[in-house]
Image (cartoon, rainbow, N blue to C red):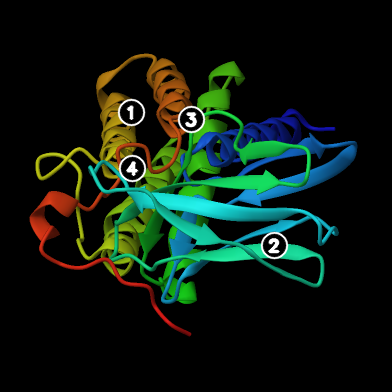
Amino acid sequence: MKRSVLFWILAFLITVGAGIYQRRTGPTYPIDGKINLNGKEIKYELERSHAGDGNQIVKIETGDETVSGFVEWKRYKTTDDWMNVPMKYENGILSAELPHQPPAGKLEYRVTLRDAQQIISLPEKNTVVIRFRGDVPLAILISHVACMFIGLLLSTRAGIEFFSKEPKLKKLIYWTIGLFAVGGLVFGPFVQNYAFGAYWTGWPLGSDLTDNKTAAMILLWVIAAIALKKSKRPKRWALIAAVLTIAVYLVPHSVLGSELDYSKMDNQPVTMVVK
């Protein structure tokens, strides 16, 4: 097998691994697990992101009508009292609803299950924070994700060219810049606006790490592109840019993301959307 093919396979594996790690460690990935309630194993998955209209349904499959439960919630980072919503049992599933929030609004919640002998909280420690966002058109979302993923693949592949005797960097670097720019600076702001009502919330307008990460990755590769003409060893700059890009990318998605300040809307009542 040719070395270039091996390099592409390695770049693909690194890119997929980074994507999975970032997704699973992010603050919007569901919290899941299992508990033992008097000898019965119950699996659960608690969502941390809600897209579109309507309330968020919290559901736990128990398969046992003798198990009851309730959901407690309040607006995140507020002094609100905890609201208590009894869960309804139907077809083996306990469920309750969290009220819909404006884009970037967050709720803090926890689930309590109980039977005649035992009471268990889910999660067993702390609470779950869920963020609400608007719907993003599928074409825009796919275009954004595709550009960023392929851009990361090409940036990783450019870094691996460090191990080639005759590195071919020009096309890889320029395509990396182009894809990150289109994905992060064109489609990215549209995704952000549909989801949270703002095109850019990174520096200097805010502290959204997702936006700042995009700017940092593009800057790294602009420096690598300059090194093509200014440096005697441009492949070193490509390797540095690739490693730092992976490091930046591994920062969990949506950390320090858009967050509604409820203190500015305290006069507005908390309401439940009725389906």
For label 4, the residue is 210
Q: Marks 3 and 1: CB-CB under 8 Å? A: no
Residue drawn at x 71%, y 48% is: 44
Q: Which residue is mark 3?
A: 250
Give residue 150's mark: none
Q: Nearer the viewer, residue 22 or 151?
A: 22
| Residue 261 visible here | no
Check disc 1 and report the residue beneath it: 224
> Which residue is disc 2 drawn over?
94
- Within 10 Å of disc 3 (Cα), the crowding (few <14, some 14-19, many 20+) is some
Say if 97 sits above or below 126 in the image.
below
> Which mark is in front, 3 or 1?
3
Image quadrant containing the N terminus: top right
In primary-sequence order, the first of circles 4 and 2 is 2
Query: Comparing marks 1 and 4, which lies closer to the viewer?
Result: 4
Q: CA distance from mark 1 to mark 4?
A: 22 Å
In the rendered view, does 185 fall on the left or right side of 138? left
Residues under numbered marks 1 and 4 in contact, where contact means CB atoms less than 8 Å apart: no
Q: Amino acid at mark 1?
A: Ala
| Callout 3: SS | loop
